[in-house]
Amino acid sequence: MYRRLVGGVLLFLLAAVAIIARREWVAHIRLTPVKMPVPTSVSAYSTGDFRIDVSYLYEIEIRFHIKNPDPITDCLIGIEAESQSCGDRTPLLQGKWKVYDAKRTALAEGIVKPGGYRDSLGISRTLGSFYAKAGQIYRVDLENSKDITALASTSPTLIVHPHREFNTDWGATYYYVEPVAIVCAIVGAYFVAAALLTARSQSAPSTHNN
C-alpha cells in the first residue's frame, strides 16, 4: 500500500512537472525564426540577424500564396520549369543564397535549384538548407539574378523553418509530452486513490472491534 501511494504521488508530480516544463518551453521558442515578405523590387536582400531556439537542419523557403493553380505562374515560379507548356518562360527565381553566423563568417551557400511543391497554402520553393545550433545568431543573404516583380501579386514570403523531418525526429518530444504526462497523472491518481481506499478498508475492522 505504501509503495503504491508513493509511486502514485511521484507519477502525478512528474506528470505535472513535464506539462509545466513543456508549456514553458513552447511559450519561449520559435520554430519559424524568419517569416518576412520578399522585396520583389530589388535583386538582393537579407533576413537580418535572427536567433535559433532549437538545434536542427533548417530550410530556406519562399512561399507564394496562390489559391488557384495557374500554369503561367507555375512556370515563372519554377514548379513546372521543365513542362512543355512553359515554352520560353524560364523560372524567375534564379540566384544564390548564403548563410552567416554572428561573426559574419559564411557557413553555407548555394544556388537556387529548380523545383517546388504545392499544398493548401500555395506553392513553395526550397532554396537551400543549413544546420543551425540553438542560441546562435544567423543571417541569410539572397541575391536573385532575374527581375521577380511579376510575382509580386503572389505575396512571396521568405521562411526559415526546421526541415520537414523535424516532425518525426522531435514529434514524440514536442507534440506528445503533454498527452503522455496526462495519462501518467491519471495512473498516478488511480494509485493514490487505490492506496487510500485500501488503507481505509484495513482500518475499518480495527475501529469496529474497538
Image (cartoon, helix red, strand yellow):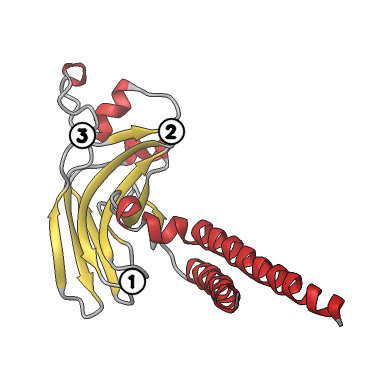
User: Can residue 96 be seen by looking at this rendering?
Assistant: yes
Residue in the foreground of this view, choosing between 90 and 206: 206
In three-dimensional space, the C-alpha distance between marks 3 and 1, rounded to whole angstroms, equals 29 Å
The residue lying at 35 percent from left, 51 percent from top is 167
Labels 2 and 1: the sequence-earlier one:
1
- Which residue is labeled 2 in the image? 120
Say which mark, if any, is on residue 152. Answer: none
- Which residue is labeled 1 in the image? 49
Q: In this view, does 23 lie above or below 124?
A: below
Q: What residue type is labelled 3?
A: Pro
Residue in the foreground of this view, choosing between 27 and 95: 27
Left or right of 101 in this view: 167: right
User: Can residue 38 be seen by looking at this rendering?
Assistant: no
Q: Which element carries disc 2, helix, strand or loop?
A: loop
The residue lying at 29 percent from left, 68 percent from top is 55
Q: How crowded is mark 3: few (under 14 residues within 10 Å), some or many (20 or more)?
A: many
* Image coords of residue 37 (percent x, y): 41, 52
Q: Is residue 14 above or below residue 160?
A: below
Toward which corner of the image does residue 90 lie, by quadrant? top left
Q: In this view, does 178 lie above or below 9?
A: above
Toward which corner of the image does residue 169 lie, by quadrant? bottom left
* Image coords of residue 113 (percent x, y): 15, 43
- Which residue is labeled 3 in the image? 91
The residue lying at 16 percent from left, 75 percent from top is 105
* Image coords of residue 155 (percent x, y): 42, 42
